[in-house]
Amino acid sequence: KPRAVNVANFPTANERSLHSECNIVLLGCRGVGKSALTVKFLTRRFISEYDPFLEDTYTSEEVVDQQPVLVRIMDTADQDGPVNPERYLHWANVFLVVYSIDNKQSFERCCQYLDIISQYNRGALHECPVLLLGNKLDMERYRQVSKADGSGLASRHGCLFREISACLDFRLVQQIFHDAIQEVRRD
Ligand code: GDP
Ligand code: MG
């Protein structure tokens, strides 16, 4: 027997936006800097050594465009390509797919994640936005992936593209996460 639901207790659209939430998932192969970016965003610090096997979800209260948002960040730790994507596909509001500009293989591996998300988006009610991130921009001298290759891959998958470094300016890292939240709000 269905239970009566008192609609008066539901938050109004305005209250919902005041208590809005955003689940962000970082994907990409091992060593590209997913944890470094996550920790930098959460603590403003660059941590050079982070357990490569540790997968965890963090929360942070942010204010983006004068609006508070509860951000949850899942810092995944796939060791060798995508496994069990079910754990994040339904949970995520937005994906950050990361490669390292000094590692061609990490760029090629991104395609696997982009394909999984594209396939998921085709069957979903709301498309989940994706940001493709070329990390380790401070390693310009050792660049193996051109900016044009990065933006080309992003446009083929209909996603945004940024190059970034987890060990340079905090505000640039913060802006990436805020861009992700703005993409979710745009939907
Ligand atoms: P994850 O496996 O994707 O979580 O990668 P980590 O965050 O553990 O980083 C892997 C290695 O790359 C570590 O030695 C980090 O210090 C280094 N690293 C991460 N981000 C950057 C960056 O932007 N620039 C440089 N030079 N090194 C980075
Ligand atoms: Mg990690």
Image (cartoon, rainbow, N blue to C red):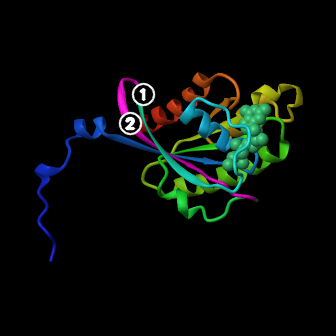
**What SS does tag 2 mark?**
strand
Q: Which residue appears at 58% of the width and 29% of the height?
A: 44
Looking at the rendering, in which quadrant would you find the N terminus? bottom left
The reply to whether residue 9 is in sight is: yes
Prevailing SS of the magenta stretch = strand
Label 1 beta carbon less than 8 Å to ligand 1: no
Give the number of callouts. 2
Query: What percent of the width, then of the height, locates residue 48?
Result: 73, 38
Query: Is 83 positioned to the left or the right of 67 in the image?
Result: right
Q: Which mark is residue 64?
A: 1
Residue 167 lies, in percent from the top left, at: 70, 29
Three-letter residue code for mark 2: Val
Q: Earlier in the sequence, mark 1 or mark 2?
A: 1
Residue 34 position within the rendered picture, expressed as x and y whole percent measured from the top left: 66, 43
Residue occupying the point 53% across, 53% down: 121
Q: Is residue 168 left or right of residue 68?
A: right
Q: Amino acid at mark 1?
A: Val
Residue behind mark 2? 69
Are the two marked residues, 1 and 2, in contact with CB atoms closer than 8 angstroms? Answer: yes
> Could one spot residue 32 in this view of the protein?
no
Q: Which residue occupies the extreme bottom position in the image?
A: 1
Q: Nearer the viewer, residue 2 or 26?
A: 26
Which residues make up the magenta segment?
Answer: 64-79
> Nearest the camera: 130 or 181?
181
Report the disc number at residue 36.
none
Q: Residue at x 72, y 39 (%)?
A: 153
